[in-house]
Image (cartoon, rainbow, N blue to C red):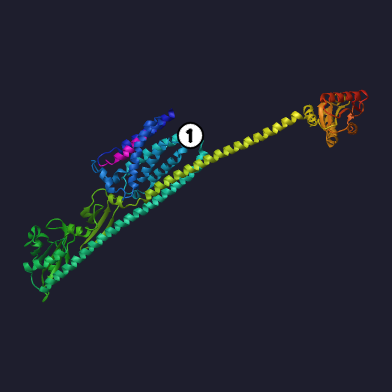
Amino acid sequence: MTRRRFLISLCLVALCIALLGLWPRSGHEANTFLLMMLTLLAAGQAAWHWRSRFLSQLFLGMSLLINILLTCTFLLPEVWVGVDRWGALLAGLPGDWHVANIRPSILVMLACLGLNCSTLLCMRLKFGAVILLAQVTLLLVFALVADPSILVASMPLVGGDRLTLLACLGVLLLAQWLDLLPALTRMWRRNLVPLLIATGVTFICLLAWQHQSRDENQRLMLTTYVLGDKIATELSGEIDDQLDAMRRFAQLWSLMGQTPSRGEWQALSRQYYEDFQYFLNIAYIDRDSVVTQVFPEDGRNRDLLGVRLFDLQADTPLSNPLELGIEGHTGIIDLLQGGKGAVSYLPVRNPRDGDILGAVAMVVELASLLDESVKTNLNDDFAITLSEGRDAYLHIGAKRHLASWGHQVPIEFPATNLMLSLHPAQHFLMTNRGRLPEATLLTGLLLAYLLFLVLYFHRHVSQEHQVVTQANHALKEEMSRREQLQKEIQWLARHDELTQLPNRHYFLEQVKACSAKMPLSIMILDVDFFKSINDTLGHLEGDRYLQTIASVLRAPIEAAGGILARFGGEEFVVCLPECPRAVGRTLAEELRRSVQAAALPQPATDSVVTVSIGMACVTKVPFHLETLLQAADEALYMAKASGRNQVQIAA
């Protein structure tokens, strides 16, 4: 119970971190989706630790739904669901909403997805919970150390917000690791190898994602730079073209050698003005800097007629053409008509004596010039700024949701170091950025997860197979041991353990089996004075005597096709199928002599051990085995009564 409370406390701590650090405030309305997802994730995990499966699945299901929707904005191709369609879903919400602002980086999204799935899968090892947590750990590490420049078109979480988010996910991850640790400790052998291999695959996928993201960002940067350079080149070319045209225009008046009349000025100026519609006006200025002609004569330009420019602009470059006979350029200035622009002054000379007659003034409005140059290249995907040093003269295009980077390209503009700055908007990045890095990352994570499951279950089946094999092997050994034991028991049930000869029971079975093989001879042998051997030499020595006598008797009896058995104590019994009386007697005498020849010392007679033999023979069936044994036993007693060490045959 204490452990469960500790895990629930960790989930509540994560929830508090998310609420305190990411609560939507002015300008951060987009944190709402992220905060909802983290809140539901923490609540679902806490409910799981509290053993409330219904609430856990409810909260985690809603969190998973938000997670999948946000992940789809990374993965779905633009031709399927465009950025504008995603944006249309957010258009009716109050505040600063944009698709790129409502989603954190793909690393954070997949980390939340891993924590969500791990809890929904009940944190079971067999469901791959351990590899999910390992993948989440790697994702958070990469999110912590990754270069923010590769995380384009995502929520700009930096500084405190970024640390808050990672801390919240780190605490939830810690709670899941602690919950899984006991099971992992018990089954680490089964999980270690699959975990290391699958984690290695995950790490490689993250490196591949990082590399592909950099390549994709460089492609976007190159596209932006090429566009900025194109606009700057067109702008510089347009300026050069209009300067060349105005030089020809001034040269024309120089060739005429006179001050232009109003009609002449209007007729010739109109042609140039229509070619360069960004001209604010084209004016003629006399030697005293008075504006005598202007085209077009609209409201803003008509007020310039009769104005002496030296009085308004004492340090104007107009003195260059009027006094020195060279071109003069103002650079970017505040125009008399209002707005920003530039004025170029070109001298008009008398062709006969070279005297300066006046100057032609070309007034270019900066906004119109820029619009003319970028009208085919600009939309809301870019922001263009014309500036000189720290002074920004003009800005057109997107004003919000811009990328953190851009390009500056110099423009060849007379008398000024004009720079064109081009910044892409998040809309452009989302629309044109390829989905390959995110698709590679998600596919790699899924493959690593499936690889872990395959290896896990393979090792599980292998271990189970090994256990079954060991159990089968042990069972076979047990069966073999039992079979051998059964054979030994059966053998012991039929044989005498001391002499290794058949016992009385087995002997009787054998006699019955060969009862039809006539004539049948039965012998009973008894060791003479055996009690004295046990009393004098001991029972162990007596047992050795019995073993020696059994080995002496066994060879000739088995050679004759007979059966030798121990009948009890010092008595042995012999069955000889198909053995006539005479043959049996001869064999009995041979047995007696063989025992005597063994030369076993007999303490009772100070000689060697001898045996007495009683024999009975039957020639036809039926017969009674008990009667036959009784007859042989009586013959044995006759042999003992007659002085022992002899053979007696029953009638």
Judged left or right of residue 392, residue 545 is right
Q: Amino acid at mark 1?
A: Pro
Q: Main secondary structure of the magenta part?
A: helix
- Quarter holding the N terminus is top left
* Residue farthest toward the bottom in the current orientation of the protein: 352
Taking 505 as reference, is 123 above or below it?
A: below
- Residue 14 visible in the shown view: no
Q: Is residue 28 within the magenta segment? A: yes
The stretch in magenta equals 27-43
Residue 565, how many percent across, how many down?
Answer: 81, 30
Q: Quadrant of residue 384?
A: bottom left
Residue 615, how many percent across, how many down?
Answer: 88, 28
**Mark 1 — residue?**
182
Residue 256, how many percent across, how many down?
Answer: 10, 73
Judged left or right of residue 152, residue 285 is left
Q: Quadrant of residue 122?
A: top left
